[in-house]
């Protein structure tokens, strides 16, 4: 929820993305974040670093799979970016 707030979404828009929360809970979370911004930001950075380390570890352990997935992703992106022939 913090990331959506940091990306500029209003509490009402956040509610659309997190319908299990109430608007009161969203405002409470934003208030908590603003009051404890340094701690929350540090916590989020730590989580991002742990995720990056785990991703790297999995990439190294499954190198062939990672290479195949990367090639597929590039192929798929290339296909969606390819110019469409003119329909005359």
Image (cartoon, rainbow, N blue to C red):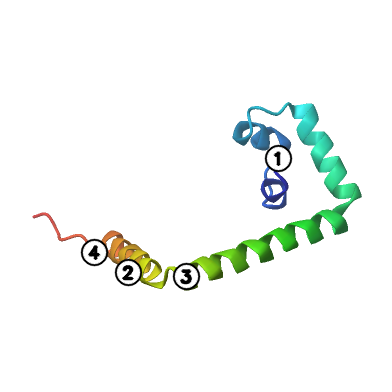
**Residue reaching furthest left?**
88
Residue 73 position, x and y percent, is 35, 63
* Tag 3 residue: 61
Residue 11 position, x and y percent, is 72, 36
Q: In which quadrant of the rendered view does residue 16 lie?
A: top right
Residue 27 position, x and y percent, is 80, 35
- The crowding category of the residue bearing disc 3, from other C-alpha atoms within 10 Å (few below 14, some 14 to 19, many at least 20), is few
Residue 49 position, x and y percent, is 68, 66
Horizontal relation, residue 59 to residue 46: left or right: left
* Disc marking residue 83: 4
Q: Earlier in the sequence, mark 2 or mark 3?
A: 3
Q: Earlier in the sequence, mark 1 or mark 3?
A: 1
Q: How many marks can you see?
A: 4
Q: In which quadrant of the rendered view does residue 54 lie?
A: bottom right
Q: Earlier in the sequence, mark 4 or mark 3?
A: 3
Q: CA distance from mark 2 to mark 3?
A: 17 Å
Q: Nearer the viewer, residue 11 or 55?
A: 55
Question: For the residue labelled by badge 1, is the local secondary structure a helix, a strand or a loop?
Answer: loop
Q: Earlier in the sequence, mark 1 or mark 4?
A: 1
Q: Earlier in the sequence, mark 2 or mark 1?
A: 1
Quick one: quadrant of the C terminus?
A: bottom left
From this view, report whether residue 18 is shown above or below residue 58.
Answer: above
Residue found at x 89% / y 51%: 36
């Amino acid at each position: 929820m913090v990331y959506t707030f940091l990306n500029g979404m209003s509490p009402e828009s956040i509610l659309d993305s997190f319908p299990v929360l109430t608007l009161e809970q969203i405002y409470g979370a934003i208030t908590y974040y603003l009051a404890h911004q340094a701690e929350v930001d540090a916590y989020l950075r730590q989580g991002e670093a742990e995720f990056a380390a785990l991703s790297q570890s999995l990439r190294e352990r499954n190198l062939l799979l990672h290479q195949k997935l990367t090639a597929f992703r590039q192929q798929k992106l290339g296909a969606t970016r390819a110019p469409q022939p003119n329909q005359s």
